Image: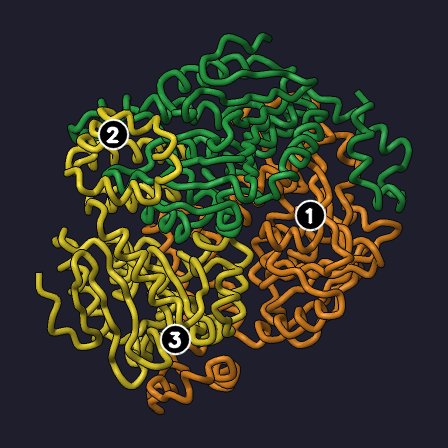
Chain colours: A orange, B green, C yellow
């Protein structure tokens, strides 16, 4: 596939990892142009099994992704709407589409991520932030609305109710270490460590089968929307989906033929084994 | 509105912040008097848009709120009841009413909060506790019951299953730092820092529109009870609700007219900007 | 009850605590033998109110429980199956049965717990791990499948979405401190502290009524599968269930007769009180 001609970012593929770099001066504003770009990017990724991991980063020295552009926010209707007539906002739809990509998605946050920029980050599967550079905020409560790019819906799925409410109601800045402590990000990393960390993680996942990556994502996201018995059924569903498309059976057979599972050295060495087994196809 | 004539606490309003101080010797027992007071307080708050934040604290030197009074617990039926005939306990109803207030609620815990006192704290939106003074416990498993003031229902919504089960099954004391590590509270703070911290937080939120505070709360609480697609619809519903009642559109228009969103200085200065924008009404 | 004649572990009861020690050389593989043993163990425990706590540990110097045996994994169908025809795997059924035991269950992890071994641990109520000895991994994404012993379904119930996805998608080792930071375990403990810690916890819970332990478990697990109003009803249901079977009412009456709840010394001394009250039956 070709990942070109975007207005607000550029993308480059290295093996199975696509790196998307936001670069939309002056502030990486999250306007219609960026949403259109993300929508088109998602459409392409949905059909591309050669990309297995997407890393989002920014070329801007201070900003990851800024908040939603007031240029479209000002046109939101001021009419209250009955629940049965509600349709999702374009912003919600695009970020939900990003969240539902079959690829593993990683936000590498080395600057400000506030408002819609923070909600974009929450729509990614994993988030890492650079100490001394990342700064977070949901300012919507202070503007007179609520985070409406999925932020109000996704925050408590990451951090529990109490901390989600504090972040959203306080509408104030917090940094990478606070984000790690509260759980909005996976980890805070020193500014010179975040690049190598994310590279290694992305390259590792990029060597796994595309279909097992998708199966893992589908089952985990489904798990928190379903009671446990239904979640387990969904898990089994994705097991057969992945078994039907990946070399899993050959790998189990290979291990079993060699008695690999009962070898104590193997048990000590799983971190490498799981990479070596990629050669069995 | 008038917040007077309570038996178990007193209340004083300063601008948009109502401070409720438990003061019911000898131990701030959570009896029918306290539940009646909380019920009446909630009824008044539900209709009062001048109060936007409620801070709960205690005048007792050692106790925030004690457990439910054995004086009413001893009268709970010992007859097992079929699921279809179950009605909520008065204790559950009152604490759920507190949880569903349109205001932001903050528990400032500077003493013991065990049993029903701990469950009351969990029914608040946010919780902060003083090191060296706060002590927590759910003792119900040891008494022969379960936490039945919403504690069994709300604990895992804050801290995940494993830690919720340990807290509830072990029925033992834990302190502010352990509570922070497990996530039952937002943060543990030094005893001389908790007052200023909560004041600043309450005063900040108190300057935001009442309707955006409510919208944020409704959407966040709904988000964990709904699958993601339905949660996003609820989020959109509350967006239009808040747009219809707050000056949000004027603020977006104001920012857009000034190109404020694309100004790099503004992006560096959001923590103050969000307060300054309150003047646009 | 008699807990004997298992192939992959042995069990010994001390008062209300059953200790189950995995001992199935060479690597404590999670094969059909172990699943059969766990299934039979669960069947017995479901009818045994004399056991109130089950501690799982390992006699193996390096391994808690290893991954699922490739010997049965290799026979999983490679045919995709429609959702309406999905049935749970034997592995899922057995671990769900463990999760639903009426007893409190504790995993004391002093070695490797990867793949199905990690999923077994997640099916326990509480998890503690020894620093320097425990090592965790879900390697399934790398094999071409997903964690299908409940791991994909239970991970986010413990740690939130972002960290669950990283653990499952990265398929790499992590240690006890990382597990504590992410929340897959309750606590990481020094290797010489974990034994006494788990003993004390198990013995404490073991003195509480079997029916209140069960009520706590049922309500907490139900709470995250239900909207809050339904969760509160389930909580009330289990209150009457436990009131009908435990000495709770006698204990409330005893406290009330003595005015114990309003005694300041008692309020300072709850950690011991809750044990002393066990004598009121």
Q: Do we see residue A244 in this rendering?
A: no
Residue at the image position 54 percent from the left and 30 percent from the top: B218
For marks 3 and 2, the one nearer the N-term is: 3
Which percent across, then down, holds residue A248?
Answer: 42, 77
Q: Residues within 10 Å of mark 2 (few under 14, many from 20)?
A: some
Secondary structure of the residue carrying tag 2 is: helix
Q: In the image, which is nearer the foreground, mark 1 or mark 2?
A: 2
Helix, strand or loop at mark 3: loop
C-alpha separation, residue under disc 1 versus residue under disc 2: 51 Å
Q: Is residue B6 left or right of residue C50?
A: right
Q: Quadrant of residue B48?
A: top right
Direction from residue A228 to residue C275 in the image, left or right: left
Distance Cα–Cα, label 3 vs label 1: 38 Å
Q: Marks 3/2: CA distance?
A: 45 Å
Residue at the spot 39% in from the left edge and 44% down from the top edge: C224
Count every numbered label the image shows and give the total: 3
Which residue corresponds to mark 2?
Answer: C255
Q: Quadrant of the N terminus of chain B?
A: top right
Instruction: Work out whether residue A121 or residue A168 is closer to the camera in this orientation and state it.
Output: A168
Q: Which residue is mark 3?
A: C111
Mark 1 on the same chain as mark 2: no
**Mark 3 against mark 1, which lies toward the viewer?**
3
Q: Which dot, 3 or 2, sits closer to the camera?
A: 2
For disc 1, the marked residue is A118
């Amino acid at each position: 596939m070709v990942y070109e001609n975007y207005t607000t970012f550029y993308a480059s593929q290295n093996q199975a990892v696509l790196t998307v770099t936001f670069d939309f001066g002056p502030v990486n504003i999250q306007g219609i142009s960026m949403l259109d770009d993300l929508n088109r990017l998602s459409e392409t990724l949905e059909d591309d099994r050669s990309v297995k991991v997407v890393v989002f980063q920014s070329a801007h020295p201070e900003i990851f992704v800024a908040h939603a552009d007031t240029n479209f926010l000002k046109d939101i209707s001021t009419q209250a709407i009955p629940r049965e007539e509600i349709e999702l906002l374009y912003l919600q739809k695009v970020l939900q589409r990003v969240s539902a990509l079959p690829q593993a998605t990683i936000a590498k946050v080395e600057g400000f991520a506030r408002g819609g920029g923070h909600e974009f980050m929450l729509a990614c599967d994993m988030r890492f932030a650079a100490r001394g550079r990342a700064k977070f905020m949901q300012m919507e409560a202070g503007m007179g609305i609520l985070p409406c790019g999925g932020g109000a819906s996704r925050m408590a799925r990451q951090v529990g109710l109490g901390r989600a409410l504090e972040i959203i109601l306080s509408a104030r800045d917090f940094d990478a270490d606070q984000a790690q402590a509260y759980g909005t990000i996976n980890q805070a990393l020193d500014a010179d460590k975040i690049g190598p960390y994310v590279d290694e993680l992305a390259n590792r996942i990029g060597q796994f089968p595309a279909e097992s990556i998708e199966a893992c994502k589908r089952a985990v996201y489904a798990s928190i929307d379903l009671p446990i018995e239904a979640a387990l059924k969904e898990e089994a569903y994705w097991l057969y989906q992945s078994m039907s498309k990946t070399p899993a059976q050959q790998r189990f057979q290979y291990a079993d033929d060699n008695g690999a599972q009962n070898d104590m050295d193997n048990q000590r060495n799983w971190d490498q084994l799981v990479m070596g087994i990629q050669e069995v196809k």
